[in-house]
Amino acid sequence: MQSPNPLGKADQTLSRNMTLLAHHELGGFGGLGEGISLQITADGRRILWVAHESAPKNFSGIDVTDPKNPNLIVQTDLPHMQVRSNSLDVFGNILAVAYQTQVVGLKPAGVDLFDISVPEQPKLLSHFDCSGPHSRGVHALWFVDGKYIHMSSGSEDFEPTHPLDDQFYRILDVTDPTQPFEAGRWWYPGTRKGDISPPPPRMPKLDTGYRVHNTNVFPREPNRAYVGYIDGGAFVLDIEDMKNIKVISHWNHSPPLNGFIHTVLPLFDRGLWIVSDECVMDDGADWPKLVWVVDARNEENPVSIGTFPMPNPEVFTKRGGRFGAHNLHENLPIPGSFYSDTIIIGTFFNGGVRVFDTTNPYRVEEIAYYVPGAPKLSPAGAIQINDVFVDENAIVYAIDRFGGGVYILEMNI
Amino acid sequence: MIVNFKRDVISGKIPVTIITGFLGSGKTTLIRQLLVHPSMNKVAVVINEIGEIGIDQDLVTLSSENISLLANGCICCSVRTDMQETLRDLFTRRTIGDIFDFDRIIIETTGLADPAPILQTLVSDTLLEAQFRFDGLVTLVDAVNLPDQLENLKEPEKQLAIADRIFVTKTDLIDTNQMDQLVQLIRNVNPSSPIQKILHGNIDPNELMGIGLTSSKASQKTLHFLGENTPQTGEKYLGVFAKRHTSNIQTETLRFKTPFTWQAFSSALDLLTTLRGVDLLRVKGIINVENQPIVVQGVQHIFHPPITLDRWPSEDHDSRIVFITRNIPKEVLKSLFDVVTQVVKPAGLN
């Protein structure tokens, strides 16, 4: 008798405690990056902003006031095919968009700030240029207070010791969004030519670079930056003096694992960090890519105490495309965002969007998931859920990396 | 304002509906129809013996050991050595991706159709208790034979008394007057649960779902679950039912204005269960425990873990408990809770 194994079939939608309310393919441009945020307009509308994963589209705005009936209200274009926007954030009526080029030396490579008071008509306020002979521009940014953009960026004056180490931590002061300027920067010692420290050793099996990815700073502790430094590990930085940033904590699981620490999400009241890796290779080639629970009650001695349970890798690494951890809902301190210090929502490429209860940090429990069937014409042949935003009503907005667009889900937890 | 989201302690658990009914009540016919219904996608049906049902093999897409996957997405599972092992096996195979990620279970009871052992399994096995919740008990009764059965046997009366939904089969074999009398007969034993006629097992599966408490977040649904303001009772309060005299099964409602301590309430309930568990058929209520609303429910001597609601579902903060019992007068129940409350030290006193 044949044993049914539906999880391994990429066309099969899988779900537990999550219900699909709506699905929007964004007019055929449903390949989305890792920028997703919510604007609540003066007239009470709720606009979901998403960054596209690659050209030709830049960013899109979707009216999700009624999450069962999303309506695409604006979609913008990039100037050429060798740039991607990948990341964005919204604070009030200001939208910040990151631009990264495929190779160094191209433009635009930096940050745009838009006035989105009228969401249908974004107005460019300023462009901050981060291009340079060794820079691809900005990969990811964090903008939640209206004052500072924290970002992973190259710079005209930064020549890395290794070409993969081109994006470091930069802070922009955008108090006046028409005139942003650099307020601070920090990089992994040894990654810039001229550093006293020697260049860091490369990861033995898979070198994905000593680059910054996510740079999270929360208003409740504005002097701490939680930084995923890819192969460099997880850092907590003291940014009280942005001109003199100091390392508070450093934790890394690699080697022996395959690097690529992506997000460091602090759960302040519990003294925990939730740290996610990013899977960057298909078919499990860089497995395991996990979400980690780190006991950081002693900032100077962070200790991993567990990982999130994952669906069966024997099944999912054969389901098509990437399988493993990626973005988390980051408890964005903005109006309309879901906040929990126990419930964590993450994206896992072909593992879909998954929900975890970390009440017992030593035994994290998976409590919900949604894995859409493969989007039409997906080059991966499977869903590749890339990023997620959750609103204060526990409505989940999950986005696909190739073509699937936005999946709007209700959690039954 | 940032609000720290807290998990609903029960909504994520997989609901379990138990179907019971005396021999000849049409359970097999119902199950046969359910298995092929289009709305049964992602439902696992646990039955005694697949062979008895006689599934059309053309509808079976995959099968392994004791599990058949049907074309509509329904999983049909026959009991292995016992229900506990069967349910654990289903959950494990679901987790590892061996079968569809079903989101509901329907269980057909065996033998004399006593649901107590299944409920005992659901609340005492730590894995099952963490993953499943009892949703409701559906009882099938045979329109032709029920009067005789109630006259001569104890078991059908108990099955009726503890049912959350009652389905009357073979109603094409009786006339309208006989149906009216049958409803009266049922109401003598069970004054409140919805009664529905079904023919040849044809039923909308949704009738078997969403019966119990589905969330610890208080809402109108909580009041409905408690039996308040429902079309069935037409009464304002839980369990204010018309008195019946032809059965030794009574439905009684107690109301307490003074909040309990948990120790006092649970001690009284423990005492009642110890002394008269056999005659305690069903208990359901909302209890004011030091001003917190806590839902309790039990079938016979088995009680589910109490559920603390996030808030009171209405302005009424009195404790209200409905008891379906065999020959336990209301005054005795009331006295028991009053006395135990007095014996237990009030909270805060040393």
Image (cartoon, grey):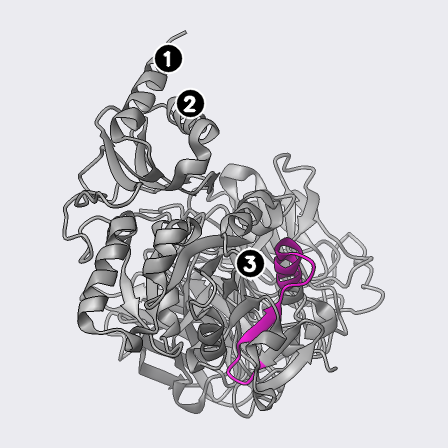
Above or below, B212 relative to B254: below
Is residue B212 in view?
no
Q: Which residue is mark 3?
A: B111
Upstream in the sequence, badge 1 or badge 2? 2
Q: Quadrant of the C terminus of chain A?
A: bottom left
Are marks 1 and 2 in one subunit? yes
Mark 1 touches mark 2? (CB < 8 Å): no
Q: Residue at x 27, y 75 (%)?
A: A119
Q: Which residue is mark 2?
A: B263
The disc numbered 2 marks a residue on which chain?
A: B
Is residue A94 in view?
yes
Upstream in the sequence, badge 3 or badge 1? 3
- On the image, which quarter does residue B198 sit in? bottom left
Upstream in the sequence, badge 2 or badge 3? 3
Q: What amino acid is labelled 2 in the image? A: Gln
Mark 3 touches mark 1? (CB < 8 Å): no
x and y percent of residue B232 in the render? Answer: 20, 56
Q: Quadrant of the N terminus of chain A?
A: bottom right
- On the image, which quarter does residue A381 sit in? bottom right
Q: Is residue B248 shown left or right of residue A333?
A: left
Mark 2 touches mark 3? (CB < 8 Å): no
- On the image, which quarter does residue A175 sit in? bottom left
Number of marks drawn: 3
- The foreground one among A213 and B177 is B177
Q: Which residue is mark 1?
A: B343
Q: CA distance from mark 1 to mark 2?
A: 11 Å
Magenta part of the chain: B70-92
Q: Residue at x 32, y 56 (%)?
A: A335
- Within-10-Å neighbours for mark 1: few <14, some 14–19, many 20+: few
x and y percent of residue A53 in the render? Answer: 52, 79
Q: Secondary structure at mark 1?
A: helix
